[in-house]
Amino acid sequence: MESLLFYAFACMAIVSALLLVNIRNTARALFLLFIVLFAMAGLYLFALADFIAITQILVYVGGVLILLIFAFMLSNKELLTDLQSASKRFISLPSWQALVLAFAFLGVMIYSYISWSHHMPQWITQSEAKGSIILSTDNNIKALGFKFMTQYVLPFEIISVFLMLALIGAAHVSRKGDNT
Amino acid sequence: MADFIVHIIVPVAIFAFIAGFTLFAVYAERKIAGFVQDRLGPMETGKYGLMQTLADILKLLQKEFITPSAADKILFAVAPIVIFVAVFIGFSVIPWAPDFIPANTNTGLFFIMAIVAIDAIGILMAGWGSNNKYSLLGSIRAIAQMVSYELPVGLSLIAAVMITQTLNLNDIAYLQGIASPEQIYFMGFWNVTDIGGIFAWHIFQAPHLLIVYAIFFIASLAECNRAPFDIPEAESELIGGFHTEYGGIKFAFLFLAEYAMMFLVAILGVVIFLGGWNSPLPNVGSLRLADWTTGLGWGIVWTLLKSLTIVGIQMWIRWTLPRFRADQLMTLCWKILIPLAFVCLAISGLWRILVML
């Protein structure tokens, strides 16, 4: 049952991602992105990362995606037609960088499949033997909170200062009035 | 296999409840509107007009599917489903009685806050898919409002969570009654762990939580696009906002989602601030009222009674207050509610450290 759900989410993510890059209609593409992000959140759940899964929905779907749709709705129509009139072929290569990236990633995938398809990497078997693994019944969010407030408090604070900087910057840029 | 059947029965039961609640709530809404405006409300269909909403839903079900020719067909058809499902899955983490909860997760509260964001996407889909200026304007207004008011909702919930120290809604409800695993203090000085009742509710555990609940209630009205925050639907300016083009069963689903959202925010406020399924009656000496009125059946009764009272207040407000202007709406959110919520957040932290220890 669980593996069935996993493959359903994985298929949903892959198929809608493929559709997303091929579709002509930008509005539909943005809503397909929603399905991709949602399916990814489902996949995170299978990695027992429930906090990450919900954060994914909250930040990407609730924040970034709505912002993208707004930007799309408020942008110039000629600009959009310019974007849409790319190549009409099924497989189009606008630049060689994409090809390099794709093949590099494929290489990593093939390498990991060859080396780990029959036996787990050593660090996984070691931690399994020690018993230091996360169970689905563990209170992950509590452990995460303790880690953030003790071991990782400095990175956590630096991130919050960065977010504050971005907010102040956005408020400054969007402010109208005198430019002196 | 038994597990599998439970996984089907529970959503069906919740759906049946939402449908029944919507029928009842629409009738109540029209009766309350009638009372506030000094008229009778629906009286023709059935005794006291009781069959009116049933007749309405039958009419909606029979209607033809109409899709505007210029609409984006797929988005137009999918939007009501997305909106309804977003609200519907929010009910999966709501506790109804002690340990009587569809999904007892450690991230329940966080989950609901994320789910509300999906609702916003559905409204944008409906507005864009209809290809109608009124719809688009309505959905843009709705999103601006929902994104703004998510902040006071989130901040007020965080202020409460700092006191509870858990995101699990079942545990949050446990912390407000006689079955609490921790000591409860009324306003921080009077130990009411054995007394329970209304004194153990979160809004009375710390004085600022009363203000936090008021912020949550006001902001949640805006989250479900209810008057006085109904500029996304503003009948007099926008015909009906994002659902202008919808008819028949699609409109029925949008309507169902709106009332389900009302109930969801009401029950969420009840679980977090108003004691959840705990009895409002305290133990007085040998009169163990709280002990007698806590349990599975009583829990469901209390949850329903409290939530329906809150829904009733939402309706009362809708027919009493006039609609806000868009700039007044944003002023209220950004200049009053959010600073107040931040102050309450700081007080919560201090309260937890200095008073609750």
Image (tube, coloured by chain):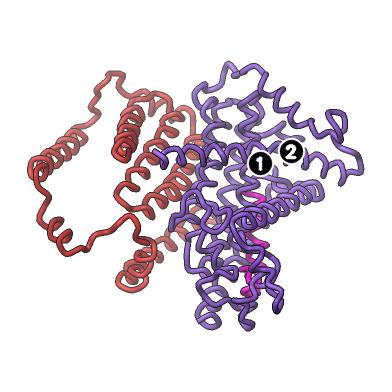
Q: How many numbered callouts?
A: 2
Q: Quadrant of the N terminus of chain A?
A: top left
Q: Is residue A170 left or right of residue A36?
A: right
User: Do the dots labelled 1 and 2 sit on one chain?
Assistant: yes
Circles 1 and 2: CB distance less than 8 Å? Answer: yes
The x, y position of residue B268, in whole percent, is 59, 55
Tell me the element at label 1.
helix
The secondary structure that dominates the magenta segment is helix
Q: Which chain is red?
A: A
Pick whichever, B150 or A112, lies toward us.
A112
Farthest residue, direction right: B38
B330 in the magenta segment: no
Q: Say which label, 1 or 2, has the lower sequence index.
A: 2
Read off the chain for label 2: B
Which numbered dot is residue B259? 1
Tell me the element at label 2.
helix
Q: Which residues are magenta?
A: B200-223
User: From this viewpoint, is residue A158 visible?
Assistant: no
Drawing shade for chain B:
purple
